[in-house]
Amino acid sequence: MTRYARIKALSARAVRPTHFTFSALVLALTGCASIPDSSNDVQPPPMVTTVGVKEQPLAITRSEGPLSPVPGIEPMVARSTLPVAASAIAEDPRDAVGPVEDPLSGQPMVLGDANAREDLWARVRTGFGMPTLDSDLVRDHERWYASRPDYVKRMTERGSRYLFHVVEELQRRQMPTELALLPFIESAFNPQAMSSARASGMWQFMPLTGKDYDLKQNMFRDDRRDVLASTRAALDYLGRLNKMFGGDWQLALAAYNWGEGNVKRAIARNERAGLPTDYESLNMPAETRHYVPKFQAVKNIVMAPQDFGLTLPPLENHPYFVSVPIRRDIDVSVAARLAGLGLEEFKALNPQMNKPVILAAGTPQVLLPYDNADGFIRRLGNFRGPLATWTAWVVPKTMRSAEAAHQTGMSEVALREMNRIPPKMLVKAGSTLLVQRSEQRVQDVPEHVADNAHMALAPDVPPLRKVAISARKGDTVAALAKRYRVTASQIASWNHIDDETRFRKAQSLVIWQPVKESGASRRDTASADKSDRKLSRRELAQAAREERLNASKSGKSGKAAQREMAAAAPHNRAAAVKGTRISPTRLARK
């Protein structure tokens, strides 16, 4: 079947026909220098940049290489390791998903729009709306990209999955389309990019900024890596910055990279000094000073690639992926097999998944390539076996991982590995653990758990109690630590003092010590110890008398008598030591 015939077959499954654009997905010029290409030893252009909404330069880590082609469909055998009761939740697997939708509009898709054959590059160029920056830094970056055509080609392939959808959203908002090139600068259009400062996703959101823009981050998913959600949030943020700086896009981009507060302070400094407050006049870190020129260089190359000796591949005007609504929990591996995709390709389109299961209550849709969505729905209808083998379990009380494993029917090693529980840690009550499904746990995860799942850990140590102590004049923290059998750093931390403090006057402090046994237990233990001590003294006294008596009767020396007594009475609790007399043990003072 030809690709066009497959597209027609896909459109026949839509419930409500609506109109949308059709084409073949393309590649966008990355120009991203924040992540050097490992092949050919290509070095990054001047002043590596990475992330928006942060105060420090960041270095992104990611895997290199162009996008791999969609693998062929392999024969699939349904494998079930669960009891029949756990596998029979969805009698009709087709109920697990909805009709194919446009990811942006949410409407069922109908294919065949005449505009679909337009060139996406031309669509991007006609939407340019930012003022041009002309400087030596721009020309530096232009030369860097122009001298590395293979690098540019590989970087554009990374953006081929996502560029169409970014352009669609920009034009819907009536924003300049050159903003679609910004992820090339931020992350090389890698939605799984993670910086050393924990900025994540192709738009590089910091955790707090992501929460400000409704990007959920919990143990099951991180929406900073979600292609559609992060694009929505990034364009919301860029639009807000543009209004904040009076419609100046260059200042807005500087704020996206450096932080809005820093840009405001830089403007205020120039105002106090009577200096201009435009982008090029501000005193900024080197990364931010290169950020907009680098962006301008990529824009110039996209506008006229022939001027730089580069050729951009033709881009058709249709999305690479479509949206398939999810209605039942489904394992990531099962979804990938049903779609005819390799696991890495599936994760590249759905990078927000933190766990090996997709929760329908927290994930409204999955994204699949155009040519795979129809096959996914067909195979799902014929699938026999459990769609999900994992579920969530909320810990009812604080417990060790061994007890949690026993209650969930898993091995402790598997439970700790799946949930990343370090050794010697307690799982606190209310934590959510990912566990295998069983006959007792067959229902899909509810929405309140999917949206608020978290895990809290505590050290597995004996319970402690707070004890008040007194430091005398001249005492040191080290002396107190030795006296109370704790460390100097602990006393310093508990009392907010330096661990080298010497007290000039008496002072009250606190320490934490293990909780002692109950009063009854302590009395019983003390009584037993006291009886043992009395018995020991009587035994030793009796042994000494017997020694003297035997020695006088036999006429043997004291040393010989000691040796005979030790051999004849090994049960005595006193040891016969060569060269010493056996005498009662002196009790230690309390």
Image (cartoon, rainbow, N blue to C red):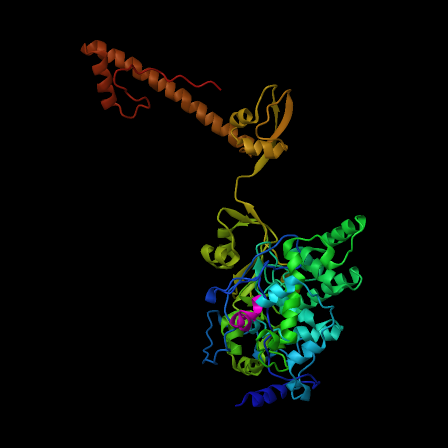
Q: Is residue 263 left or right of residue 503?
A: right
Residue 575 spot, x, y in % from top left:
30, 22
Which image quadrant is residue 61 in?
Answer: bottom right
Front in this rendered view, residue 462 or 16:
16
Residue 56 spot, x, y in % from top left:
63, 52
Front in this rendered view, residue 442 or 212:
212
Instruction: Residue at 59%, 81% (x, y): give it.
Output: 314
The magenta segment: 144-155
Q: What secondary structure is the stretch in magenta mostly built from?
A: helix
Front in this rendered view, residue 90 or 265:
265
Magenta stretch contains residue 154 = yes
Which image quadrant is residue 277 in?
Answer: bottom right
Magenta stretch contains residue 187 = no
Residue 585 spot, x, y in % from top left:
37, 18
Residue 406 spot, x, y in % from top left:
49, 55
Which image quadrant is residue 280 in?
Answer: bottom right
